[in-house]
């Protein structure tokens, strides 16, 4: 078979592309650089980030904004670039493509994404809800499981769902994700130290010393900040400070999980309590997040293997299991 099977996870901060037989072949910033008027695409992904970082008359645009819907004017050219990168410029053998979307996306929006994918060079285009893709990528047997929770912790949003026998029993999408944690860290440093963190430093604090649970040791990290006059200064921020700053945002995710658990039919409660919850997405890499959510929800919780890639991998794997995901999905052939 010469036609490739491609799964695409178009996220708020990152785009991942999975190709059957090759694995994840693209893991880059979900950003596109255009000229000043937005009329010409200059670069996509990592090259776009580097180009924008140099300054000059370039604009950075993203296909997904804080997990809140898709900008089709941006998504179309980005999909065209990504598909072209995988299949080559000739596009003799057009690929089968599946994209992940949030469960709350409307039918009109789904149709627009599918049409953009076909116009970008796909032979067939399909959509799968992100929690279902995440579960498949986490190696959950979604067609046969009698009940499991999946929590996909993205940058702009967190999608939560209870899944049994290939169907989502309950689901919720909340506008709290990794970016919200970064903003909380930024705000805390400004309040406590009267300094503004330099771009990217809040995320670095989150990754290197951040923890959902109280840190056991007196960890800390020296980062770059700026005072009111714009002068750059070095500042040491402790792990305890980071932990405290992100509690409200993590609490919102825990509350979302509790609401989904409350929606599960009584006939499936015991199964879900037994099978627990699996965490996927980049946010699942935060230290202590599984223990934090287990304590708040009363549900056993674990982090999937390679959580950041689960949605992209599951999206690609679903192309070989259309009978499992086709029910309730919108697709074009």
Image: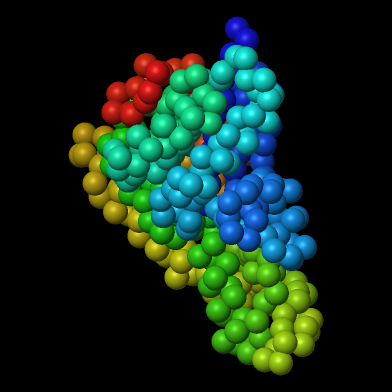
Instruction: Classify 22 as above or below 268.
Output: above
Point out the image quarter for the N terminus: top right
Q: Is residue 166 left or right of residue 135?
A: left
Point out the image quarter for the C terminus: top left
Q: Is residue 146 left or right of residue 45?
A: left
Residue at 63 percent across and 10 percent down: it is 2
Q: Specify the quadrant of the image occupied by residue 164.
A: top left
**Picture coordinates of residue 126 (x, y %)?**
42, 26
**Picture coordinates of residue 238 (x, y %)?**
68, 76
Residue 302 appears in view: no
Residue at 51 percent across and 43 percent down: it is 75
Instruction: Classify 300 as above or below 85.
Output: below
Q: Is residue 107 left or right of residue 152?
A: left
Residue at 35 percent across and 34 percent down: it is 111
Of residues 139 and 227, the one nearer the viewer is 227
Q: Specify the quadrant of the image occupied by residue 166.
A: top left
Of residues 296 and 113, the one nearer the viewer is 113
Which residue is outermost to the top? 1
Of residues 276 and 12, the one nearer the viewer is 12
**Picture coordinates of residue 77 (x, y %)?**
56, 41
Q: Is residue 252 left or right of residue 316?
A: left
Q: Specify the quadrant of the image occupied by residue 103.
A: top left
Colouring rule applied to residues: rainbow
Instruction: Classify 21 as above or below 52.
Output: above
Instruction: Classify 282 as above or below 209.
Output: above
Residue at 74 percent across and 56 percent down: it is 51
Please count the marks in the image: 0
Residue 255 appears in view: yes
């Amino acid at each position: 078979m010469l036609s490739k099977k491609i799964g695409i996870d178009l996220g708020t901060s990152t785009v991942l592309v999975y190709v059957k037989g090759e694995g994840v072949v693209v893991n880059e910033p979900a950003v596109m650089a255009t000229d000043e008027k937005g009329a010409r695409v200059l670069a996509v992904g990592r090259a776009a980030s580097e180009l924008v970082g140099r300054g000059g008359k370039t604009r950075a645009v993203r296909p997904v904004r804080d997990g809140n819907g898709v900008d089709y004017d941006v998504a179309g050219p980005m999909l065209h670039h990504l598909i072209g990168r995988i299949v080559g410029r000739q596009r003799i053998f057009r690929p089968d493509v599946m994209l992940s979307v949030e469960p709350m996306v409307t039918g009109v929006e789904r149709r627009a994404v599918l049409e953009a994918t076909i116009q970008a060079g796909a032979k067939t285009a399909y959509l799968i809800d992100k929690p279902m893709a995440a579960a498949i990528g986490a190696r959950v047997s979604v067609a046969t499981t009698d009940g499991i929770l999946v929590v996909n912790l993205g940058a702009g949003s967190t999608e939560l769902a209870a899944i049994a026998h290939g169907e989502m029993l309950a689901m919720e999408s909340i506008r709290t994700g990794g970016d919200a944690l970064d903003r909380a860290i930024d705000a805390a440093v400004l309040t406590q130290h009267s300094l503004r963190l330099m771009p990217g430093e809040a995320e670095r604090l989150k990754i290197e010393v951040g923890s959902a649970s109280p840190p056991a040791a007196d960890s800390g990290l020296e980062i770059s900040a700026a005072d009111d006059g714009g002068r750059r200064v070095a500042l040491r921020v402790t792990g305890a400070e980071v932990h405290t700053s992100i509690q409200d945002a993590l609490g919102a995710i825990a509350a979302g999980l509790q609401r989904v658990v409350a929606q599960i039919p009584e006939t499936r409660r015991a199964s879900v309590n037994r099978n627990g919850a699996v965490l996927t997405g980049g946010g699942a890499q935060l230290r202590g997040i599984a223990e934090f959510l287990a304590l708040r929800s009363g549900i056993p919780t674990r982090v999937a293997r390679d959580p950041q890639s689960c949605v992209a991998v599951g999206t690609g794997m679903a192309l070989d299991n259309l009978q499992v995901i086709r029910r309730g999905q919108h697709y074009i052939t």
